[in-house]
Amino acid sequence: IGLSHSDLEFVFRHSSDLSILWGCFRSSSSQSSVVKIAVCSSNQRIATRRMKWNNAALAAFATIAGNVSAFSPAASRAFVPRAAYSSSTLNMAKVNRLSDPGKQLLDNVDVFIFDCDGVIWRGDSVIDGIPEVLEKLRAAGKKMFFVTNNSTKSRKGYKKKFDSLGLKVPAEEIFSSSFAAAAYLEQTKFKDTGKKVYIIGEIGICEELDLIGVPWIGGPQDKDKVPNMGPGDIVEHDHDVAAVIVGFDRYINYHKIQTAQLCINENPGCEFIATNLDAVTHLTDAQEWAGNGSMVGAIKGCTGKEPTVVGKPSPLMIDYLCDKLGLEKSRICMVGDRLDTDVLFGTDNGLRSILVLSGVTSEEKLLSDSNPITPDYYCDSIVDFVVKEPAGM
């Protein structure tokens, strides 16, 4: 499969948040390899799994191992296989359908974190029954937060959307990946550098950066720009740009891609930040649309660089909530429609997790033998969270 012993050693040892003890050997009488991995970190008990893989499976693992962990230091981001070592991927347990929401869920959860697209709404339409469920959860004393990987709006913009859909949600309960990008820049003291940010994305990122006083260029300002590509033509770029943020952009164009690659490739130390890697999104309720993963992929392709990811499943937003509000992770439930962002956000960060089938993930995909990511429960939509009263009452 083209992986040497030293290649495997590099994959396992270059992790920013895990200490990997590993061993690998190949049986001379078998077509398969056996990999024994011991994974330990400051907040995880040591877990050892013995996994026997045929050559194709080992090749797939090598691909997964190339994934990038959010917020890892720039020098060690090349191989950080966060997803490969999550509890969900190492233990492929059967997923049970939520059947008794009182005992299975409500008795054990104080805080719900809801994804928005595919959970609360699809496009510009509220999913049936959602307003009533949210009211009943509040009446039961449950705290709620709404965390979306969609960066096209700021928190202020999402508040307007909730209002327009008739959903009574306070602004302080709303968190978007545009906010996460700004929070990351605050965390890393980017403003102190005096540098600028180049944005591929929409107004949400711009508004959040304005709130923290970080100067930016690009974004909506570049939506109609077309580079001249005659003999000798070049695209000029700003050498004061020290970070490129890539968020979902319905107006992405070649000028933006070229400017981003110039900043990342030619400005020393320029950081590549992605709000999320979602493959598809719900722009309308009629079909799935290409998500921010396609835009991030374009920049990865022309720079050869991996991004720092600030949206789900990054721990940034859950750490922010727990630090600010003193929440207990074991009493929090992440509810979403995506396995690789929402459910992984829950499993990787010590939360309970529920997958709803009202968005992009089908029951067939969830229960497939090829799916390694497992929530605690799944259900059709959050309407199933409400205990149904017996008929005649």
Image (tube, grey):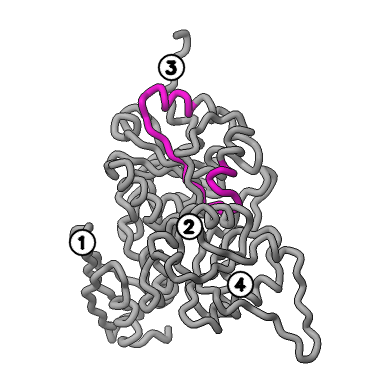
Q: Is residue 349 magenta?
A: no
Crowdedness near tag 2: few (<14), some (14–19) or many (≥20) residues, C-alpha within 10 Å = many
Looking at marks 4 and 1 on the same chain, the residue that comes earlier in the sequence is marked by 1
Q: Is residue 138 magenta?
A: yes
What amino acid is labelled 3 in the image? Glu
Residue under the image location 48 percent in, 73 percent down: 271
Q: Secondary structure at mark 3?
A: loop
What amino acid is labelled 4 in the image? Ala
Looking at marks 3 and 4 on the same chain, the residue that comes earlier in the sequence is marked by 4
The C terminus lies in which quarter of the figure? top left
Q: Which residue is labeled 1 in the image?
A: 42
Residue under the image location 22 percent in, 57 percent down: 43
The residue closer to the viewer here, 221 or 260, is 221
Q: Secondary structure at mark 4?
A: helix
Residue under the image location 35 percent in, 59 percent down: 89
The magenta stretch spans which residues? 133-158
Q: Secondary structure at mark 2?
A: helix
CA separation, marks 4 and 1?
A: 35 Å
Looking at marks 3 and 2 on the same chain, the residue that comes earlier in the sequence is marked by 2
Q: Which residue is labeled 4 in the image?
A: 298
Q: Specify whether residue 368 is in view.
A: no
- Kindly give the residue lying farthest to the bottom in the view shown: 232
Q: Position of residue 85 (x, y in %)?
A: 32, 64
Crowdedness near tag 3: few (<14), some (14–19) or many (≥20) residues, C-alpha within 10 Å = few
Identify the image quadrant of residue 28: bottom left
